[in-house]
Image (spheres, rainbow, N blue to C red):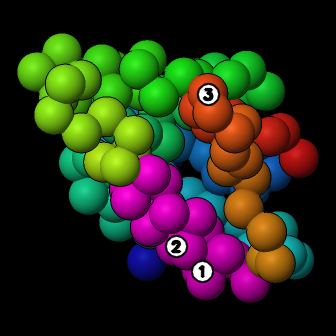
Amino acid sequence: MTTTVSKSKGIGDKTCTMYLSEHVCILYDKLNRPIEVQLTATEWKIMEVLLKNMNHVVSYTQLTLMVWGPDYLEVSGRPLAHWHVKNLRDLIMHRTGRSESPIQTVRGFGYKWKVR
């Protein structure tokens, strides 16, 4: 599928670019070929938070607040975030053919998107 998007509005790196106003997410494979992917609403929010904070750690608490809101802090925080981040990692590696994901776990604290 070919999508025309405004390059100036994109956030991301060599692995992924999100065009927020067009609600388009493009992953790039090992040969730097673009692959448009469909994300769930939750996956979209997580990717947006991580890409807007590239190379900075986003704590489990921050991620939960930004994606699900304060009602989820006491309910499940880490397990909920962990499950969705695992799915995103799998999606990125599967669709791009890369052996590792740019989403890194900072043990005991949260996640960060490592710029490539």
Query: Which residues fall within the magenta stretch?
Result: 82-97
Foreground of the two, 8 or 66: 66
Position above or below: 105 against 6: below
Please report whichever mark, 2 or 3, sits nearer to the chain's N-terminal start.
2
Asked whether the beta carbons under mark 2 and mark 1 sit within 8 Å of each other, the answer is yes
Q: Quadrant of residue 83?
A: bottom left
Please state if 113 lies on the left or on the right of 52 as rendered. Answer: right
| Disc 2 element | helix
Position above or below: 97 against 59: below
Residue 60, given in percent of the width and then of the height, sits at 47, 28
Residue designated by label 2: 91
Residue designated by label 1: 95
Foreground of the two, 39 or 103: 103
Q: Which mark is residue 109?
A: 3
Q: Residue at point 55% right, 74% down? A: 90
Q: Residues within 10 Å of mark 3 (few under 14, many from 20)?
A: few
Foreground of the two, 87 or 6: 87
Please state if 110 lies on the left or on the right of 44 as rendered. Answer: right
- Nearer the observer: mark 3 or 1; the answer is 3
Q: Is residue 21 visible?
A: no
